[in-house]
Image: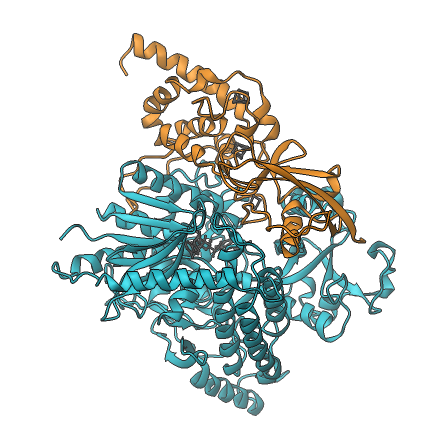
Chain colours: A cyan, B orange
Amino acid sequence: MSKPNVIVIGGGLGGLWATLRIAHAGFPVELFSLFEVKRSHSVCAQGGINAVLDSKGQHDSIRQHIIDTVKGGEYLANQPPVKAMCEDAPGLIRTFERMGVTFSRTSEGLLDQRLFGGVKNKRTCFAGASTGQQLLYGVDQQVRRLESEDKVVKHEWWEFLSLLLDADGVCRGIVAMDLKSLEVRAFAADAIVVASGGMGQLYAPKSTTSTNSTGAAASRCYRQGAWMANAEFFQFHPTAMMGHDKNRLMSEAARGEGGRIWVPKTPGDRRPPKTIPESERFYFLEEFFPAYGNTVARDEAARAIWTVTRQMGLGIGGDGGDRVYLDLTHLDAAFIGARLGAILEIYRKFAGVDPMTEPMEIFPAAHYGMGGLWVDFERSADGGIQPDSPRNHATNIPGLYACGECDYAYHGANRLGANSLLSASYSGRIAGESVVSYLKGLASDGASLAPEIPQAEVARQQAINADLMRADGADTPYLIQKELGALMTAKVGVVRSNPELESAVGELQVLRDRLRNARLGESSTWSNQSLAFARQLGDMIELAGVVARGALARDECRGAHYKPAFRIPIPEGKFAGDPEFETYRARWHANNAQWLKTTIAEHTEDGPRLSYQEVDLSVYPPTEPRDYR
Amino acid sequence: MTEQPIHLRIRRQDRPDSAPYWQEFAIPGRSDHNIVSLLMALRENPVTVSGQRVDPVVWEHNCMEEVCGACALLINGVPRPSCSALVAELEQPIRLEPLPKFPVVRDLLVDRRRIDQGLKQVKAWIKIDGVWDTHEGAPRIGPSEWAANYLYSRCMSCGCCMAACPQFGTDSDFLGPAPLAQVRLMNAHPTGRYDKTERLHAIMADGGLSDCGNAQNCVRVCPKEIPLTTAIGELGRQTTVQLLKDIFGPR
Ligand SMILES: Cc1cc2nc3c(=O)[nH]c(=O)nc-3n(C[C@H](O)[C@H](O)[C@H](O)COP(=O)(O)OP(=O)(O)OC[C@H]3O[C@@H](n4cnc5c(N)ncnc54)[C@H](O)[C@@H]3O)c2cc1C
Ligand code: SF4
Ligand code: SF4
Ligand code: FES
């Protein structure tokens, strides 16, 4: 038998780490990406990456990093992987450092660390204002080196379309399409790693993610039997600046430094903001949250903006008036310039407006899909994960692994700023180690894939292309995507209700039917981007259905998923011992007993079949309700 | 902001080997549109000014934040990322052409693999023993040294500098400014410097540093304001020293 080989789908942080780990173990890797890997969405991250180095005299501890992550995800993450990730974080940073990542330095020439949302200690390593870019380039350079040594082969501008499963349901390869020639071809492999990134584009254009963060690749695995988990949890960032193409992130720092959020008190007031007198402005965060005002937590701010724009009809701007002002114009220009220079620059560059003189228009934008492909782990004796276990990051399809934003593990990663770059990198490396163990365990006389299977699958995929090319309906896929984004933003967004979710499920079905008859508007067989896009859109609608169904079923408020009808409020002015508080405590426990679970979605022809799985709470169990009063 | 028709003249090409041709469009849009968002609007309804329905325009874009480097075009004759090119700043009709010097794949999409080849040629990486933790602390790098290096680490391989460089092109084997600047970056790293000689030899060969005519076009267009000519100057000194070492000294 020749040496087992691996296919990695995706060249963001997750995929490149997996590639490196596998190639370093001596197994050949073929890396697939929609474009040159260094253009992957990972470059967008600015803020930083977490690791406890305790370099700031704050007695920071890995234990605290674990607790912050667990709480950040409202206990939805399996805790052994979280523990292992936090423990490994300092080593990962050291490895990045060795790769030449230009992390920012202290005056002593050591790694600098800063404070980031959701934590009390300075724990975030950063590289100027372009951390994601620098981290990605670190691994990209290593992969390029392995490529020059023929240990890695890159297939850039190739799109993964489907998995090749043998008669026993074991993953044995993929079918992919050359995005230039549109050639559809089968590639055999002994193990596959999907690292295809997030699915923020389900909410386009009201999303902070790159256009390629469609979730289509994960959706394709799901359709072939891989489980999706916790898809209903979607993080929205409250202050994203509007754009026709996408929403760009406006850092929380703008509020932290004194920015005020407001809308005109009169609905539909079209006067330029600067001419609206103070008395006719509604500073709603300051009114809703007197204690915190504009610096209230991300989730709360996003919900308040939602209430004011969607329910009170006070939003500004076109598109149904869904924006609010983030105003810095009252602040001292020199102070703001010094403290917020980088983000002011982004606003100026992309909106053509100076936020020092004009209030910014912002909206809560879809930022991070916290759910994704379900993956396994093996708990170790010390409560972390077993090193080199082939179960770590394995999906439920044998031979198929997932890592990075497309998997569901480390929930809470992104509700704690700067934890997602960590989870993408860490999970990539672990998935790589796991695959190496899996390959070593493969029977050396492993039966090869019967040739009919790839032949049939290639033919099936070619037929899908041909059908799309022939279709001649009323809509183009681009228009349908616009409607998908609007639907998801309106009905499966920041604040959810069952009637709206039900109607969303129905409307998604309509979109699916319309897509079936869409017109590509071009028949070229060379670099036909509309064709690739139409295919992805079908997978996005499928995935949107999983998000909406999961949200409909989950009758509670937990983390990024918020349904006011099922809120369990802390009784005001009551504390432990008061009967009202004890009733509340009992309800909180009962709710956890029912809902502190992982949602598992399995594909069926009639839509997702949902079930629930226990969460491993062995490191830091939730014994008391959170009470921040 | 009210909507107004925005005039675009787009140079199109159906295949790598077919002849280019021009098409003109008027798209309703606002002045806060950028070129990527305009092209997105156009693909929803690709009809020329003469009312002819045509194929959607093909181009590359991802991040829309000027950090992935994918969307660079020739806009009114200047190479620049299209996501950060605001319509309000541009003279109309806005002329869009594929980035020159790179082979056209289709319409505005070009193949920039040569940048990648250049990076391989100059070994733009740090040789590490493996991707596991070696339990060694980070080598110290002072803040001012860091600041100088950081500038170069932001190169997003957009290709604008190469498009503007008179020495770089399909008929020349000049590496171009972007890969050269990476040599400057890698040679300055505490570990990267171990392979300094190899990298310098790579750029002392044909197509290397000496092909630069010092026209300074590259720095003028780099959207990330990377000091390319400063790097080239520094490399000039490094290669001179290297040359002397090669002749006289131990390596
Ligand atoms: C604006 C923004 C700022 C952020 N800032 C931070 C931050 O400061 N700190 C932090 O920790 N996190 C941050 N995040 C989150 C973090 O950037 C992402 O979670 C992480 O980079 C995801 O990495 P990944 O490797 O999973 O996927 P990606 O980097 O998205 O890579 C996906 C890869 O998959 C490939 N691919 C996809 N589909 C296919 C297919 N069908 N066939 C072939 N290839 C395919 C693509 O080509 C690409 O190479 C931010 C996110 C956003 C949106
Ligand atoms: S300075 Fe050198 S690299 Fe830059 S444009 Fe001129 S010839 Fe090209
Ligand atoms: S040096 Fe500047 S212009 Fe050249 S590729 Fe890099 S970022 Fe683009
Ligand atoms: S789309 Fe990434 S640089 Fe313009």
Q: A541 or A208: nearer the eye?
A: A541
Decide: is A277 above or below B166: below
Screen quadrant of the C terminus of chain A: bottom right
Q: Position of residue A606 (x, y in %)?
A: 45, 81
Classify residue B157 as left or right of residue B220: left
**Direction from residue A140 to residue A591 in the image, left or right:** right
Q: Position of residue A425 (x, y in %)?
A: 39, 53
Q: Nearer the viewer, residue A508 or A522?
A: A522
Tell me if residue A264 comes above or below residue A59 in the rendering: below
> Measuring 35% from the left and 62% from the top, which residue is drawn there?
A459
Total labels: the figure holds 0
Residue A142 seen in render: yes
| Position in image of residue A560 (x %, y %) | 54, 70
**Which residue is more in the foreground, A629 or B25?**
B25
Q: Residue A388: where, in percent of width, then height? A: 23, 59
Q: Nearer the viewer, residue A409 or A609?
A: A609
- Left or right for A178, reference B108: left
- Could you tell me which residue is drawn at 54 percent across and 17 percent down? B214
Single out the residue that lies furthest toward the top.
Answer: B248
Residue at image location 17% in from the left, 50% down from the top: A3
Q: Quadrant of residue B237?
A: top left
Can residue A124 be seen from the camera position used here?
no
For residue A442, which quarter of the picture? bottom left
